[in-house]
Image: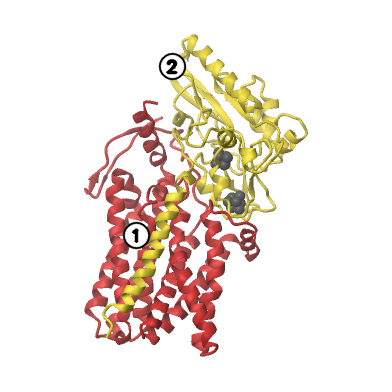
Chain colours: A red, B yellow
Amino acid sequence: MKSRTGRRDGGKQMVPEAEFTSYYGRPVLKETVWEADIPSYLFLGGLAGASSALAAGAQLSGHPELARTAKVGAAGAISLSLAALVHDLGRPARFVNMLRVFKITSPMSVGTWLVSAYAPLAMGAAASTVGRKLPRAGLAASAGAAALGPAVAAYTSALLADTAVPAWHDARRELPYLFVGSAATAAGGLGLLAVRPEAAGPAVRLATLGAAAELSAEQLLDRRLGPEAEPYRTGRAGVLLRTGQLLAIAGTGAALLGRRSRAVSALAGATLLAGSAVTRFAVFEAGRASVRDPKYVVGPQRDRLDARGG
Amino acid sequence: MAAEARALDPAALAGHRDHPPRMGFFTDTSICIGCKACEVACKEWNAVPEDGLLLTGMSYDNTQGLGASTWRHVAFIEQPGADHDGLRWLMSSDVCKHCTEAACLDVCPTGALMRTEFGTVIVQDDVCNGCGYCVSACPFGVIDRRPSDGGAHKCTLCYDRLGAGLMPACAKACPTESIQFGPLDELRERAGQRVAELHDAGRSEARLYGEDPDDGVGGAGAFFLLLDQPEVYGLPPDPVVTTRELPRIWRHAGIAAASLALAAVAACVSGRR
Ligand code: SF4
Ligand code: SF4
């Protein structure tokens, strides 16, 4: 059956009217079986990975207080993210199934190995600072966690992009930068929330860089995809994405202006953390929406075929 | 030459030596009568559990689509046409495409999805951990997770029957030979002849779907003769296996990770007091 697509969204952009055909309006692709665990996992993994990088930088540049917070934050976040993952899988033994093989064609396989190597390092680094024990081992663990952390924060973009889900696969170019930006924002936010403003300089700067990267990636995505970015603009995903943008802007502004106030800084940190989390849910929801409506699957493929003269 | 032959031979690529020829399905929908014998035979042979009984209002289709517990699905389309009192019926039995470049298999992190010696794609139930990655990777929306056991399931092209020299249950049950089973090379040849026949008979709308080794999935092991655009049957018109983009995806993820590390360093050194 033929359906008319194209709708006005908030007067922002008129999606060109197109006719597409579907089988009783049913989705062509299967809806993802992933639930809220997965966007939470994306957020927490990003927070952990970027915090480990921040911790190492802070330690080397003489910000011990921030370094300690970031290490503890990284260990806490990666533990929670593993809990989310195991909850998603149902039981811990299922995680172990993924250690049977290493497959570069499966970002989930690569990520599993990455996280399995990273998590003990992050926890070791935190344990050594908190317990003030084994400083050498702690230093080595911190260095290892800092080396793997950025990869832990970035691989999740490949996890989503390497699917048939239109909104995720189409965003493959910008998603990595969006995700590491979001990770940096979160790690900076945690530093601001937990450390005295005088000692949180690097956290403010990392959050600012992160927010800038995140917002630019979203702009680029919107512009490059044009009408195909509709799943990111409309519905729940659209609301979440705009909320995430507002929180990132508000949080960065408060962090920069409120440097002298502990309360304002802490509030800025919490805002940035919330913004990062909301953004992950936005991307997740955009993917779901793009599978639910067959026009996002059929439309671009039909256009491609017609352009080839098929 | 050798590389080319290997590219077309997924079983060899997966490490099977001296393997049988690649087997597949050619589903000729122009002679499908919509009896659903294939759906029933598949369920029976593979002991696939029941997954809901309801009336959908979608013509004679109450099955709705492929899923974890539906490995053959007959689509029914009613169109204005000259066949019966101004009505044209389209019927088509859908199935897993057993892609040459199978996204489900590529992304599976446990190795549960594997390529058999027949070049088909199956799930090993005892290995699958239910992560659901394959569900979002399949460009045809075929494989799904079964709520009752949490594992992913789909058509096995009756792997057990093939091993015993039998033909898959659906093809065996099909009374019109709309579902044809055999070595993929032969099926492709036969399909080409059948389209030519139909074109000669004035049915210019006949077309093959999934038979082309140069398509987005490297050609399907189960392909179709359709009488309208693929999307009319609920099939994606131009699916491309997602992993073709993966090298570029990894490259950008790598650059992004390096940028994050640099940003952390920059945030710490700049503005030092
Ligand atoms: S159709 Fe889907 S489930 Fe079947 S082999 Fe291809 S990618 Fe895998
Ligand atoms: S659900 Fe099972 S078959 Fe599918 S990707 Fe995960 S482990 Fe592999």
Query: Is B93 left, or right, of A59 in this rendering?
Result: right
Query: Where does residue A10 sit, x and y in percent of width and height?
Result: 24, 50
Q: Is residue B189 above or below residue B216?
A: above
Identity, as a three-letter code, of the amino acid under mark 2:
Gly
What crowding class fits label 1: few (fewer than 14 Cα within 10 Å), some (14-19), or many (20 or more)?
many
Q: Residue furthest top?
A: B201
Q: Nearer the viewer, mark 2 or mark 1?
A: 1
Return the residue at label 1: A240
Which kind of residue does numbered mark 1 sit on?
A: Leu
* Place of residue A298 in the rendered image (x, y in percent of width and height, measured from the top left): 41, 36
| Residue B56 vertical placement versus A231 (above, below) | above
Residue A97 visible here: yes
Residue matched to label 2: B81
Residue B148: x, y in percent? 64, 52
Mark 2 Cα shell of 10 Å, populated few (<14), some (14-19), many (≥20): few
Residue at the (43%, 66%) spot, across then down = A43
